[in-house]
Image (spheres, rainbow, N blue to C red):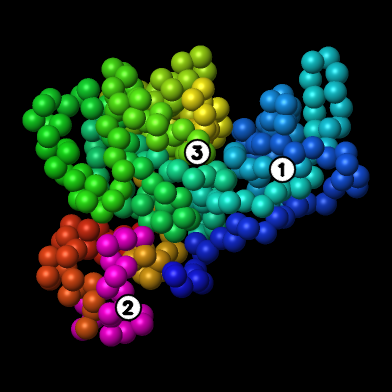
Amino acid sequence: MRPKSTDSWHTPTKRAKRPGKAAPDTRQSLQEGLVVASFGARLEVEDAAGGRLQCNAVRGGEPVVCGDRVRFALLRSGAGKRVGAVRELLPRRSLLCRPSPDGALRPMAANLDRMLIVLAPAPALYEGIIDRYLIAAEHFGIPPVLVVNKVDLLAAEQHRALRERLAPYAALGYDLVWASAKREDGLDALRATLRGHTSVFVGQSGVGKSSLVGQLLPETDVRVGAISEATGQGRHTTTTARLYHLPEGGDVIDSPGVREFSLWNIAPREAAQGFIEFRPYLAQCRFNDCTHTHEPGCGVIAAAERGEITPRRLASYRQIIEQP
């Protein structure tokens, strides 16, 4: 069992919390709902019958995010519009957070059981970014899947080379899906991965998260942008996280793109746990506070010297803890 973290990445998710103080409601008057979009303090909530309404979260409370289950009070209804207020945040199965530059945790999505890490040949694919996402997935207990999009951009030889480059992740047991939103390749495999789960698409801006969601939900308006010709970086084309129901079953959350998913205030012990092949060797280290960079008697370094950990993954871990 992983030691309990004492750094800023440890986020309890089981205890229910009320978003803040509110006017009293009888429990019978409250309804359960699912947050399908979050605009700061304004929420779009889906009720048990599938209807949608706008709700406000009471100020000063814990942030409510897409995927949260809540209890809300209906304040008014009429003229085809319903307005409510969230009174209670129900216990979460999981919570994905993104550390902000000041070190505070910023919730992104809740109640997830799949993290789809979308990659693409453009913007440039870097294993260091993949490893950062995998640390987050492992830390928050959300099973990750690597989705390689835009394979239509690759010639046959480039495709083979990329498969070889990503083969170490498959060898570690991570699922990979190869897809093209443009040509609709790999979408059946992607649907099978999503079926029956609540999943989030994460990845650099411009890798095609919204394009994939658009193919999975062709009747849904998902705004799609392009790669900036000037910078080669993707524009931020999805401005708010939104939950979509899939026709085949399951939900997906399309979250805002970020150019680089960075880790702040992550201790070496937590980073090492995110490299799953390190785990059998962590207890073999001579020192409890071993950083696996230079210490004598390090089980991880010894495993790397025996070829049981790849040099690239060990180098990636060290780069992350030195420049998170």
Q: Residue 277, image x and y in percent?
A: 27, 62
Judge from the rendering whether residue 157 lies leftward or rightward of residue 178; answer left or right.
left
Which of discs 3 and 1 lies nearer the camera? The answer is: 3
Type of the residue with mark 2: Ala
Residue 70 numbered mark, or none: 1
User: Which segment is the magenta one?
Assistant: 274-296
Q: Which residue is drawn at 87% across and 45% down?
A: 27
Q: Residue 234, image x and y in percent?
A: 35, 31
The reply to whether the C-beta atoms of the residues labelled 3 and 1 are less than 8 Å apart is no
Point out the image quarter for the C terminus. bottom left
Residue 197 numbered mark, or none: 3
Type of the residue with mark 3: His
Q: Nearer the viewer, residue 303 or 233?
A: 303
Reading the chain from its start, which is encountered first: label 3 or label 1?
1
- C-alpha distance separating marks 1 and 2: 41 Å
The answer to whether residue 174 is magenta is no
- C-alpha distance separating marks 2 and 3: 34 Å
Using the rendered view, name the quadrant where residue 281 is placed. Answer: bottom left
The reply to whether the C-beta atoms of the residues labelled 1 and 2 are less than 8 Å apart is no
Q: Nearer the viewer, residue 283 or 203?
A: 283
Kind of element beneath mark 1: strand
What residue did someone put label 2 on?
283
